């Protein structure tokens, strides 16, 4: 494979994104209107933020299946507090604390007890969903309008969810590319034994990535609550799969050691939302949604495997 | 993945096995069963197994409670199980009921196909089985289904909404929020919506069909996308009231959340009759909703089991006609609306 082909494969996530924009843009001019493009970013924010945290975990060759459940518990606690009259400045830090508690559990079992991340986070997924249902008593909670105002607020004309997504993305990008911690994350994903021999304290780094993932889940829960203004028993359900899909679509390897949040995970999250948005805009047959999304994911993974073969 | 090596392997394996077992136990949580009972004498129902696919919406909770109350009223012991959307787990739960010698089974299956082995297992054990609110696909296995007449009730609800649209004298752009396309009830509601719209194209143009997979976040994103692409949408039907918060948040974000009669009001209708819908009707934001009569369905399910056990003829299908509740009949019908009752 020549250099141009390799370069094209490296650009695959970006090219795929542009192709999707072009196809829907041709189908409906409304799709490319600035208002709709901003809407895509806003609607992608929650999944995008979780996907940023998930990227850290995937880079270490781990996985965090509990992010959706963490979002649910944090939102359920927030809902109860909001209905009891607590103000937002207290509720939001509590959501972060709840999420960090869960992710600290994940970190402890992965690094200290050495249980596989898949098993640990699957357990916290079930615990979280059960606990969330217990807290909500399986009732939908409609929250005060202050949450919706937060979700639709703008700062310097930029919607708050997009701003939070941008902030998380920027910090994550700097951490991964400009700090020793970021290099250690990649090193562990490449080869954990080699990383240990190189003197990296792998336990600490692994614990940190699960905490980052939990923190991102808390931020994503805030964004979703702001957009929805309600907590339902299905809040955050299957968010883990959307986050993994966004990270992988952005070029992050499931086997660790390779990937990035910018532009990779950003493009992945936007791509998923652009497809869903485009299908609504062109009033597509609802049966086509899963088929088209699956085809795009398949193409992306296929290109990823081609890229792997060239290395 | 991290590699595990050397003498710690056995210890780690045991730790993982323990955790996996804990996960399995957790996955099965939500079930509480009474002590084993001897099989009932023929002709008398003493114990009924109730297996729900999920308790994750208010409707299922209300249905579960209504069945529980109906069984208690008849002095019948209830064994309960919740499958957390896992069809193979539900099959196991039904087999457990059979082993424990129940006199009847009430089942809310995950879908129309995966329940057929469960029905067959009950048939082989000669235990009557009733499907609550979700029917099975065509099969030679014997069962009774008690279901809402989803297409008809949806058609009636949407027809009422279209009447309101006609009164405005203008053509309306419409959006329908669909449920899970693998759920036969969601399909029935979609068909009911399309049937109501057919022939009224001069008043209603459907510009967005948003699949939600019964997920509020997906629904919110889909509705926001549709409102962005078609800001002049003025008619929205949701296949379940459970998705109303998604619609109201998107309408509020676009400044379109207005009461009935106010300029710019979006004609809004739903299906189920939950507590949110009731409150929105009272507050004047919702035009109508098709109410499933959960009390009728619970009573009919238990009665079918008793009749089957006592040798009386039982139909294969009992249809809950439900009713449309709207701004015009709210006071009259609220007492039969399950959402109004759980709000109290």
Image: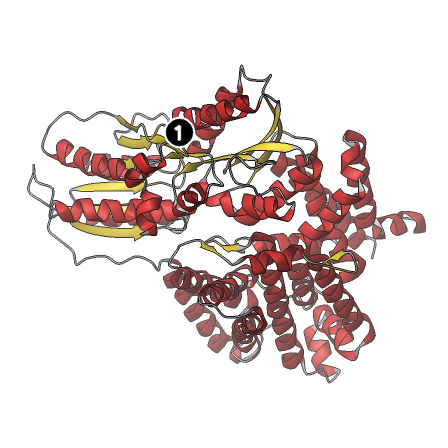
Estimate the x, y position of residue A58 in percent, counting from the top left: 67, 63
Residue ID at (30%, 35%):
B332
User: Quadrant location of residue A215?
Assistant: bottom right
Estimate the x, y position of residue A97 in percent, counting from the top left: 55, 75
**Relative to the observer, which residue lies in front, A272 or A254?**
A272
Q: Quadrant of the N terminus of chain B?
A: bottom right
Left or right of B130 in this view: B139: right
Colouring used for the render: secondary structure
Estimate the x, y position of residue B136 in percent, counting from the top left: 35, 31
Asked whether residue A209 is in view, the answer is yes
The residue positioned farthest toward the front in the image shown = B262
Left or right of B201 in this view: B52: left
The residue positioned farthest toward the bottom in the image shown = A199
As displayed, is residue A22 above or below residue B155?
A: below
As displayed, is residue A254 above or below residue A291?
A: below
Residue ID at (72%, 66%):
A168
Bin the neighbour count of mark 1 within 10 Å (Cα to Cα): few under 14, some 14-19, many 20 and up.
many
Label 1 belongs to which residue? B150
Residue ID at (45%, 30%):
B189
């Amino acid at each position: 494979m020549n250099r141009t082909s390799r370069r094209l494969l490296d650009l695959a996530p970006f090219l795929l994104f542009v192709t999707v924009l072009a196809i829907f843009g041709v189908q409906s001019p409304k799709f490319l209107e600035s208002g709709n493009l901003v809407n895509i970013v806003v609607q992608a924010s929650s999944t995008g933020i979780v996907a940023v945290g998930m990227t850290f975990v995937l880079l270490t060759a781990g996985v965090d299946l509990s992010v959706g459940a963490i979002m649910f518990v944090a939102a359920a606690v927030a809902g109860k507090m909001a209905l009891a009259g607590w103000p937002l400045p207290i509720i939001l830090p509590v959501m972060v604390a709840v999420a960090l508690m869960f992710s600290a559990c994940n970190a402890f079992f992965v690094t200290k007890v050495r249980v596989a991340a898949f098993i640990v986070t699957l357990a916290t997924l079930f615990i979280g969903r059960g606990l969330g249902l217990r807290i909500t008593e399986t009732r939908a909670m409609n929250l005060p309008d202050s949450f919706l105002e937060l979700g639709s607020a703008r700062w310097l004309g930029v919607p708050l969810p997009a701003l939070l997504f941008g902030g998380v993305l920027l910090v994550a990008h700097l951490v991964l590319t400009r700090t020793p911690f970021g290099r250690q994350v990649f090193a562990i994903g490449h080869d954990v034994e080699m990383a240990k021999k190189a003197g990296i304290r792998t336990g600490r780094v692994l614990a940190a990535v699960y905490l980052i993932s939990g923190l991102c889940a808390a931020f994503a829960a805030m964004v979703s609550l702001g957009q929805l203004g309600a907590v339902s028993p299905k809040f955050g359900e299957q968010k883990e799969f959307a986050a993994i899909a966004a990270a992988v679509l952005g070029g992050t390897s499931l086997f660790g050691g390779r990937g990035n949040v910018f532009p990779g995970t950003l493009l992945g999250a936007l791509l998923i939302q652009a497809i869903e948005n485009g299908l609504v805009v062109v009033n597509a047959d609802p049966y086509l949604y899963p088929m088209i999304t699956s085809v795009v994911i398949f193409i992306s993974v296929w290109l990823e495997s081609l890229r792997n073969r060239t290395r | 993945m991290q590699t595990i090596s050397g003498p710690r392997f056995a210890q780690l394996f045991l730790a993982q096995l323990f955790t996996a077992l804990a996960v399995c136990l957790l996955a099965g949580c939500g079930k509480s069963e009474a002590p084993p009972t001897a099989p009932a004498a023929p002709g008398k129902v003493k114990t009924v197994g109730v297996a729900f696919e999920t308790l994750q919406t208010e409707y299922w909770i209300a249905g579960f409670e209504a069945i529980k109350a109906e069984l208690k009223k008849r002095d019948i012991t209830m064994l309960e199980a919740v499958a957390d959307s896992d069809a193979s787990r539900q099959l196991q739960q039904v087999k457990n009921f059979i082993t424990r010698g129940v006199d009847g089974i009430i089942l809310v299956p995950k879908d129309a196909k995966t329940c057929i082995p469960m029905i067959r297992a009950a048939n082989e054990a000669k235990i009557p089985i009733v499907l609550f609110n979700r029917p099975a696909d065509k099969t030679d296995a014997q069962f009774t289904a008690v279901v809402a007449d989803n297409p008809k009730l949806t058609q009636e609800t949407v027809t009422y909404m279209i009447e309101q649209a006609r009164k405005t004298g203008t053509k309306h752009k419409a959006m329908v929020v669909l449920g899970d396309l693998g759920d036969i009830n969601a399909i029935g509601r979609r068909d009911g919506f399309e049937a109501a719209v057919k022939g009224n194209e001069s008043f209603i143009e459907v510009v967005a069909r948003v699949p939600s997979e019964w997920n509020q976040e997906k629904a919110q994103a889909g509705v926001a996308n549709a409102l962005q692409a078609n800001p002049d949408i003025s008619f929205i039907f949701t296949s379940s009231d459970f998705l109303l918060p998604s619609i109201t948040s998107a309408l509020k974000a676009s400044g379109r959340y207005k009461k009935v009669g106010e300029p710019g009001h979006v004609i809004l209708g739903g299906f189920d009759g939950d507590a949110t819908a009731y409150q929105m009707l009272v507050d004047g934001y919702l035009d109508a909703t098709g109410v499933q009569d959960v009390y009728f369905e619970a009573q009919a399910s238990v009665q079918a089991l008793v009749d089957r056990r006592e040798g009386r003829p039982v139909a294969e299908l009992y249809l809950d006609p439900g009713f449309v509740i709207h701004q015009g009949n709210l006071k009259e019908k609220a007492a039969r609306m399950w959402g109004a009752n759980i709000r109290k």
